[in-house]
Amino acid sequence: MAHKISSACTACGQCVDSCYVNAIVAGNPYKINDDCVDCGVCADVCPVGAIEG
Ligand code: SF4
Ligand code: SF4
């Protein structure tokens, strides 16, 4: 199961560079695609806690 971004996302973009497999796609809200390896790094970066594992 890939991590997911909830509707709490403010589209700030801070999570994008944290993902080393480039699984985070810009949008409103941002989305995580199937390349996600569930490392959890992006969830720690998100200032509003919008990323759930
Ligand atoms: S959990 Fe890891 S691999 Fe998945 S989107 Fe977040 S940073 Fe990328
Ligand atoms: S860091 Fe959080 S609020 Fe910012 S774009 Fe990523 S998921 Fe959305």
Image: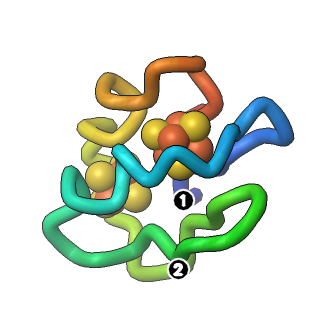
Chain-order first, disc 1 or disc 2: 1
x, y (%) of residue 36?
40, 68
SS type, badge 1: loop
Q: Which mark is residue 34?
A: 2
Residue type, label 2:
Asp
Q: Which mark is residue 2?
A: 1
x, y (%) of residue 23?
39, 74
Q: Which mark is residue 11?
A: none
Q: Residue at x 45, y 68 (%)?
A: 24
x, y (%) of residue 48?
58, 19
Relative to 37, is 34 above or below? below
Residue type, label 1:
Ala
What sort of colour scheme is used for the picture? rainbow
Q: Residue at x 85, y 40 (%)?
A: 7
Q: Residue at x 36, y 48 (%)?
A: 15
Which residue occupies the foreground of this view, 39 or 25? 25
**Callouts 1 and 2 close, C-beta under 8 Å:** yes
Quarter location, residue 31: bottom right
Q: Residue at x 75, y 56 (%)?
A: 29
SS type, badge 2: loop
